[in-house]
Amino acid sequence: MRKIPVLVAGGLVAAIALTGCSSATPASSGPVKLSMWTGFTGGDRPAYEALISDFNASHKNIQVTMDVQPWDTIAQKLPAAWATGQGPDLATPNFDPNVISKYLETNSLLPLEATGNGATDINLDKLAPSAIKAFTAKGKLYAVPANIATLQLYYNKKTFAAASITDAPKTVTEFQEDAKKLTSGGNYGLALADHETIQMWPVLQWLDGADIVDTKGCAVIDSAKSVSSLTTWANLVTKDKVAPVGKTGAEADSLFSAGKAAMEINGPWAAAGFKSAGVDFGVAAIPAGVNGTVTLASTVPLAIGKSTKHPKEAQEFLAWYTGKSAQTKFALASGFPPVRTDLGADAQLSGNAIVSSFAAALPTARLYLPGVTGATQVDSEVYVPFIGQITRGEDVAKAATEAAKKIDAITGCRG
């Protein structure tokens, strides 16, 4: 979940051994066989594999084969495959939810119509609203969330106790003051990654009521409120040295795992690694900002190729995958909150501190650059370099002005 891949247009169809959409399975020859490409190569991979195994065991008439590949490989192969009516029946194209728009441009996705309240329907009104909004275009749903995650604040209990801090910060002011107090002797108060990671810096802006773009996709990163917020956080890095500069997500994780950073904003996927490292950590809500609690949500779309020979069975799989039983088991196995909103009172989930903590953040979680034209480009070509500039001492106002121009050029904003 760390690296944000760049989508690459591909004329690679001839070199791909394509399965799934390219051939039908006659009803008389046995179960319908569905192929599925995913990029879940990390520590949460077994949880996804267990779901597929459970589905296959309970659906003798449908069998799903999950082909796990690096995200970059899928980004290279899948666009051309689906655009030409080939490739897998199902796929998670990218862990950037905005990628759905790219596949709609080539008419590559099957609209999902098997929605309703039944046990074999996709229970649309029970799925995370932010994800469904991101996957809907012109009134039609084109994907379901393969997962959904929120960012919360991990903190090192031992380090906090040594600094005589009794609990996780509750406000932005406490957050900033604790970060400074916990920075000493070569150790950081906060591990902040700025590239090859799920974004952390937008959360810091949101806490101050600032943002990157407005609802029309026009840049507001250069607004007075945004510049003020970013200047405060950049100064904490450049002057107070509360966080290292230029770290990847993996490097920031390593600092927290080694006890070299007292806090880190991260997702549920990090918990297992921190446990394995022997860190005595707690997970708390992101401190409340000027408009209350807010954090970032991430979701991976799970879609069906338009040319699949088995649309009914593929949608049946999505209905099962997003159902109560499957999502309860997945949440317990992965530490991710369920993609459903009606499992908050589930006894199994409420008894799991990690799952319940991240699930509790869903109501106030926001997606990063949702629906923004060229969102991936805005992130990789503008926002990531911009954060790198201001954390290395460049003037925030000047850098923000230049970033705003670049953002508007990508999104096509005309003011």
Image (cartoon, helix red, strand yellow):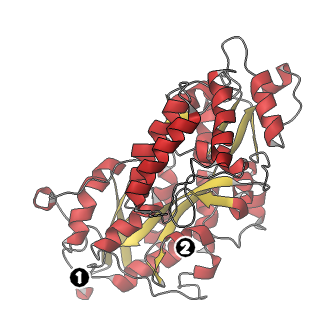
Marks 1/2: CA–CA distance:
36 Å
- Which residue is depicted at the point 69% across and 34% down? 232
The location of residue 137, given as percent across then percent down, is 45, 78
Q: Mark 1 points at which residue?
A: 29
Q: Position of residue 86 (x, y in %)?
A: 20, 71
Q: Of 354 and 7, which appears nearest the observer?
A: 7
Q: Which residue is drawn at 57% across and 66% down?
A: 215
> Which residue corresponds to the image point at 39% horizontal and 55% vertical from the top-left?
409
Q: Tell me the kind of residue under disc 2.
A: Ile
Pointer 2 residue:
132
Seen from the viewer's position, the closer of residues 261 and 369 is 369
Q: Which of 184 and 19 is in front in this view?
A: 184
The percent position of residue 12, horizontal first and vertical second, equals: 15, 57
From this view, report whether residue 39 is shown above or below residue 137. above
SS at mark 1 in the image: helix
As drawn, the residue found furthest toward the top would be: 185
Q: Residues within 10 Å of mark 1 (few under 14, many from 20)?
A: few
Q: In which quarter of the image is residue 274?
A: top right
* Disc number for residue 294: none
- Of labels 1 and 2, earlier in sequence is 1
Q: Is 412 rendered above or below residue 243?
A: below
Please report the residue visible at 49 percent of the width from the left and 38 percent of the height from the top. 386
Within 10 Å of the Cα at label 2, are there few (<14), some (14-19), or many (20+) other Cα atoms?
A: some
Instruction: Name the residue type under label 1.
Output: Ser
User: Position of 178 compared to 94: left or right?
Assistant: right
Residue 94, can we see it? no
User: SS at mark 2?
Assistant: helix
Q: In the picture provided, is 273 more to the left or to the right than 351?
A: left
Q: Position of residue 237 (x, y in %)?
A: 64, 26
